[in-house]
Image (cartoon, grey):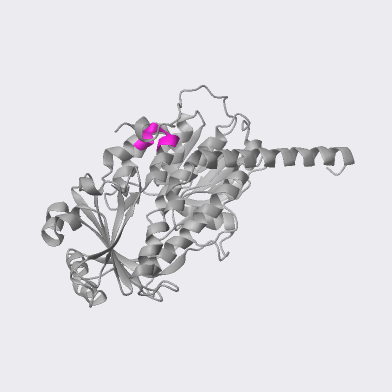
Amino acid sequence: MGLRQVFPETQDLGVPRPQKQFNIAIVGGGLAGLALAIGLVQRGIPVQIYERATEWTDAGAGLVFAKNSMAAMAKISPDVYGAFAKRSSGQGWESKKTTYMDYRDGSTDGDLITSVICADTGQESVHRTLFAKELVALLPNETFHMGKRLIAIDNRPDGGYTLRWADGQSTDADVVFGSDGIKSKCRKLLLGENSPEAAPRFAKEFAYRGMVPMERAVAVLGEEFAKNSMVNIGSGCLTTTHPIEKGTLVNVVACRSIDTWEHDGWVVPSSPEAVRKDFAGCGPVMQKVISMMDKPAMWALFDHPECSTFYKGRFALIGDAAHASTPHQGAGCGQAFEDALVLCSLLEDEHVLSAAHVEDALEAYDAIRRPRTLKIVNTSRENGEMCMRRGKDIGDDLGKVKASLDQRFHWIWDEDLDQQVQQAKAKMYEISESRLHKGAVELVTGNV
């Protein structure tokens, strides 16, 4: 099915636009930063993107998306959605094409609790790093820079910024977006190094992750469980499996609750024996899932549940730097594309011509995006607790689990993105009018 058949409202980016009198630096070459950079470049807005890593590796997680995320990609640029479609995988069985996820009782041999349906698109999955490489290929070579580790951002007298890099170089920019992930340096610089909001919060769980060839997964799990997306819920634990890379691989995640994280690093080597011990007492299907982890590592899970602002001046946070989430709704990464869509729409607006106008756009972005994204962070953590049978007022009651799962995702998926953009623009105009009115009053009264 073609792009305009799936998302018929995709806009034409070939319309001439007024030339912008500001330039933008994006710190961090993850999916949020790349999507924003592509959208800005294609709208004629000067931008440079700086990535800390010195080279790409193929290590990375599998990511899942639903229709709101894919619609956001298409609205940013058909090229972004095309890069996604090139790498994405849906459910393996035709009968499950609109299924987002099957949730199963992990204490049994995978008895079905419920099939969560996402109309039109179902679930699509990609390999994070390979998707990112496709996005980088859409950018002009001179706009993407690797090996740039940020150490400081200095304010300039004109309201812009000087970014200082670990290699001794510096970059001037009128506007800065921090897209540098959950361990964001930009977040600390914006909120304050010692602010309790600046640091991610341990989510009281860790995960074993891996990718398994589809042939092996089919041999171990059977065709239905290997080729389609599954969550098995256990007592204090869960496993998630879904196909990626056009069905050639299965992404495997096994999460376990834990009250504290005693290790210095976020990733700790483990062993198959330790995994079996952590999942002892689980049902046959969960035991089969963890048996495929040959070289496991423990990944601590963190999130950003609170933040009083996503911006200051002309400096703003996007993606995981703003609202990192646990993976339990499959919605966190998709919010990066909604961020990019709203920002592209605001910054391309004909009323945003100079750097002085950008702060109004960022205030509107914060007003519209922060409540939705932080709600997703908190409900994702809540869903993880429920799917480990620790949910408040739900516990081990699978009937209540089913009732919650059947309704909890639709407010995320059914978001009207055009309306969200219009709300952001209306907010920006309101902010601008208020600022101009205040300035006029101060001029008349002499309180300038």
Q: Is residue 190 left or right of residue 61?
A: right
Q: Most prominent secondary structure in the magenta stretch?
A: helix
Q: Nearer the viewer, residue 368 or 150?
A: 368
Q: Nearer the viewer, residue 15 or 384?
A: 384
Q: Residue at x 46, y 52 (%)?
A: 411
Residue 138 in sight here: no
Q: Residue at x 42, y 68 (%)?
A: 203
Q: Position of residue 119 (x, y in %)?
A: 35, 46
Which quarter shows the N terminus? Answer: top left
Q: Is residue 70 above or below residue 193?
A: above
Is 79 included in the stretch rendered in magenta?
A: yes
Residue 119 in sight here: yes
The residue most toward the top is 16
Q: Is residue 62 left or right of residue 249?
A: right
Q: Position of residue 434 (x, y in %)?
A: 73, 41
Q: Position of residue 274 (x, y in %)?
A: 23, 74
Q: Which residues are magenta?
A: 74-81
Q: Residue at x 58, y 57 (%)?
A: 191
Q: Nearer the viewer, residue 186 or 254?
A: 254
Q: How many marks?
A: 0
Q: Is residue 278 left or right of residue 265?
A: left
Which quarter shows the C terminus? Answer: top right
Q: Is residue 447 left or right of residue 103?
A: right
The residue most toward the right is 445
Q: Position of residue 17 (x, y in %)?
A: 54, 24
